[in-house]
Amino acid sequence: MSRETFRKAIALAGILAVCATGCSSEKSVQGAVSTLPPSSSSAAPDTAAPPATDTPTTPAAPTSAPAEPTTTAAPPQAAGWSVIDPATAAGPLAYPCCASNFYGVASPAMPAPGTALADGIYSIEFDWPAAFDQPVVATVTRFEQCSVLPAGACEDNGGGTYADDELGVDDTTAYELPLEFDEQLRVVLGGFTGADTGNFAAGNGVDMAALVTALDADYQLAIMEPYLAGASQDEITAALTAEPAYGFSAPAEQYAGALVYTHDGAPPLLFQGLLGFDDTPNDARGSDILGRIALVVAGGELTINTYAGFYS
């Protein structure tokens, strides 16, 4: 689902390694071939001894040195979700709601081909993959001041006059960025606890990949299977509220939404509607709820801000 569709629907809803160095076949050592000394025999009395002859020697069978132990790279390790104060996180943490815009500072200029992104905060779009065995190619664009962008790029709440920190997305130029969901990628995730704390947590790419994978599988079992079998959204919500299953349960506040999903210490992900806002709900995935908000580049470290919390 595109950011624009998601934002407009939210506003309309009103709520919302390798072998060790030097290991090769050349390390096999051939057995040395030795030459035995000539053998001799004693002659009987008055009989001349036969001349000494060389005894043919048979080379020893070649032997191979024991194979050196190989080392295997350890699989990427999850960091585990740690609650953070959202005030300490850089960049926007959610899509603008209720006909508002992003706020902050404009992104740096797009880099020349073959060069890296400069430190700064950018808009980012990508599709959550079904598997994380390959890099995810993200499209990175710039946040720009609304006063600089063409008309219609930002929500107009003041007759075409914008504050200096009011931002929109400049999609006239883009940068393709392969993302590895590994230990080096930092992820900030927003959810909904119904309290002032615990709504935001930080983890790494491994944590996020595990969450998306589990969410999609559980959503298919808990929501899509009964829905495709004829159950209504209200019936599914009532059933999972009465008997939580597959990570789904009632939200912390009665009118916040339909359900929340919890997994492995991540903030609860709020489903304000079960099937999102797509025109083809039969293809809905649980991960559709996870908004890709911003990319933060700082000192070579990449952070992806994501959000599945409350919109009002």
Image (tube, rainbow, N blue to C red):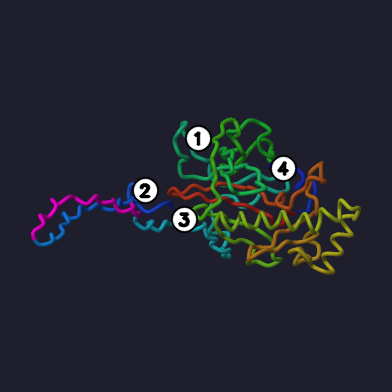
Asked if the residue at tag 3 contacts the one at tag 4, i.e. Cβ–Cβ closer than 8 Å, the answer is: no
Residue in front for this viewpoint, 215 or 19: 19
Which numbered disc, 2 or 1, marks the residue closer to the eye? 2
Q: Is 74 covered by the magenta stretch?
A: no
Q: Which residue is drawn at 28% across and 51% down?
A: 58
Which numbered disc, 3 or 2, marks the residue closer to the eye? 2
N-terminal-most mark, 2 or 4: 4
Q: Mark 4 points at which residue?
A: 1
Q: Mark 1 points at which residue?
A: 110
Which of the 4 image quarters holds residue 65? bottom left
Q: Which residue is drawn at 55% across and 46% down?
A: 295
Label 3 packing within 10 angstroms: few (<14), some (14-19), many (20+): few
Secondary element at tag 2:
loop
Question: Which range is magenta?
Answer: 46-64
Q: In which quarter of the image is the C terminus?
A: bottom right
Outermost residue, left direction? Answer: 46
Rendering coords of residue 30 (x, y %)? 30, 50
Q: Mark 3 points at which residue?
A: 73
The circle on residue 24 is: 2
